[in-house]
Amino acid sequence: NTIVPHVRVPNVPGGVAMVGQSGWTAEVMVEFGFERGLRFSGVVSIGNQCDLKVQDLFEYWGNDPDTKVILAYVEGIKDAKNFMEIAKKVSLRKPICIWKGGSSERGAKSSASHTGSLAMSHSIYQAMCRETGIIEATGLEDLMDLGAAFSCPVVPTGNKMGLVVDAGGGAIACIDIGSRLGLEVPRISAEAEKRIVTYLEGRVPPSANRNNPVDLVWISLAEAANIYTTALENVMPEVDFCMLIGYAQLKDDNLRKALSAVRDRFRKPIFWAAGNPSTQVAGTAMNIADGNPSYLFPDNAMRCIGAMVHREQFLKKVRAEDK
Amino acid sequence: NTIVPHVRVPNVPGGVAMVGQSGWTAEVMVEFGFERGLRFSGVVSIGNQCDLKVQDLFEYWGNDPDTKVILAYVEGIKDAKNFMEIAKKVSLRKPICIWKGGSSERGAKSSASHTGSLAMSHSIYQAMCRETGIIEATGLEDLMDLGAAFSCPVVPTGNKMGLVVDAGGGAIACIDIGSRLGLEVPRISAEAEKRIVTYLEGRVPPSANRNNPVDLVWISLAEAANIYTTALENVMPEVDFCMLIGYAQLKDDNLRKALSAVRDRFRKPIFWAAGNPSTQVAGTAMNIADGNPSYLFPDNAMRCIGAMVHREQFLKKVRAEDK
């Protein structure tokens, strides 16, 4: 049920696995996902699950050392008990993100003719997600965004967000969405603030906002890598991850290497949203392929940060219960 | 507060007006919005509103015959009573879509240092939106999406959706989201279904789904314009608008002309979501510029359909109260 007429995707392996119970979702994931920087361990298009079920693939990828994150578009769940057991087991090892089709009564009826899927109450499905730690995706683009997030080699171990931005309005968007997701944007210490203010003086225009968010206002693109990393290095020790809204070109290898170096030094993720999305389509893809979750708009980044932080909270809870 | 270092935007006028209380939002709207097919009557970057306020621009564009839709990023509202009066008056004539920054307590604090905006409880703001008919946007991309929707020369006069799709999974996504937005997906009459089934026989693979959604499964791209328009013509009389998920290339002038002709004949909008987003970035922009709201993913299209349908319901209610 999947038709990819012109294969434009080079064979570069990676850590994202995907199963789509609609040919369209598998195709788009392969083609558009690759263009957006996702690198795959496997993509499977599945139909009415008369032999292999989606959970069989979860189990396979759960044991596959190359797979870091499992994505799925699912219309119907067969053998729900077996699905729950496998999903719960695998989800403790690797994130499973599912976009569920047929969440409405009328949609479920339509999916019955599409893939022969039996209807399941959406509230029951959502309870299954909470129980197993499955991450609910809201659509195909959201699945790709989550794939980019969980391709990062490190995870946020808490909910404290650092913000370094070239776009003051973008910082406010991140704080607003972060509030709804239960994230904190702590003020950083006076010492760290002083180091940042001293460093930035003469390098960027003045601003009243230098303490989380660190508003850079406007930077010389030639100095971007140094300015971003200096700001990040001073904020990172006091937060669990950073969100950077930048204008400098991610196509520049040195900038991406500098960001990856800060990430690896602190073992904390740096999320990126483009201040200038129209010129950063290729650059964000390159940064994702380097393991830095990158998006054209802050909203997409924030939804993924929420998913990662909530997953860590889920894992902590399960581990505490197991003791 | 707005820096667009390299002007890449040709001077092609249109019906979208935008005011951004953050340079970033105005820049992105001009550059990325244009690339996505939006055509502008004016874009204004505004700061702390010490002279002109956003509502002054609403009033100006409300009286401007070239402006069809007003978009805004707003952090703070000055002179709320005056804002309400103007917004209510203008909104009856033209849609006003606002993305509000500072909707959280912490975000409002940050916007105080960014644009000197006074905090306003977000629930009060939302009540103002309901009262005036202001459409709440969720982010910058959503603002652009809404700009594309309201650039359409016709509006859906009811909530009945017709679905013609090349991607069965995409139809289910539309139905699920449509359910949450209060849209109906009525079964079409036996006569219309029979005409569609007869026409499609031998042209596309068999499917159990030919009655809303009309699942085309797979079409010959050379025949796309004929197949889409024949399906649309048979569904349109029984619905208020159609949603089409297609794989044919929108860069093809004949296809876009055929879609516009069906729209104009029935005076009902045709929304488009790409089955193959990676190859349709330029095509969707061309279709938007032709007045057909087009998106890379069905979710974006559905949110905009919801906004248009709800606006028509608001206008009907206000007109009924005025009698």
Image (spheres, coloured by chain):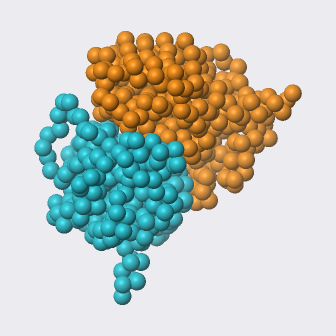
Chain colours: A orange, B cyan
Q: Position of residue B199 (x, y in %)?
A: 37, 57
Residue B227 on image: x %, y %: 34, 52
Front-lying residue, A179 or A124: A179
Instruction: Look at the image and tell me whether residue B31 can be seen.
Output: yes
For this rendering, which residue is in front, A196 or A23?
A196
**Point 87% across, 27% down: residue:** A323
Residue B311 visible in the current orientation: no
* Numbered label tally: 0
Q: Residue at x 46, y 57 (%)?
A: B120
Q: Tell me which corner region of the image, top left, top right, bottom left or bottom right, holds residue B240.
A: bottom left
Location of residue A195 (image quadrant):
top left
Q: Tell me which corner region of the image, top left, top right, bottom left or bottom right, holds residue B140.
A: top left
Residues A235 and A264: in front is A235
Q: Residue at x 65, y 45 (%)?
A: A76
> What residue do we see at 30% from left, 28% from top?
A205
B300 vs B23: above or below: below
The N terminus of chain B lies in quadrant: top left
Furthest toward the left, the residue is: B11
Instruction: Name, please, the residue furthest toward the right.
Output: A323
Image coords of residue A133 (percent x, y)? 70, 36
Query: In the figure, is residue B275 to the left or right of B178?
Result: left
Please identify the quadrant where the C terminus of chain B is shown. Answer: bottom left
Residue A318 shown left or right of residue B172 in the figure: right
Outermost residue toward the bottom?
A: B323
- A217, above or below A179, in the image: above
- Residue A214 place in picture, x, y as percent: 43, 30
Q: Is residue A36 above or below residue B310?
A: above
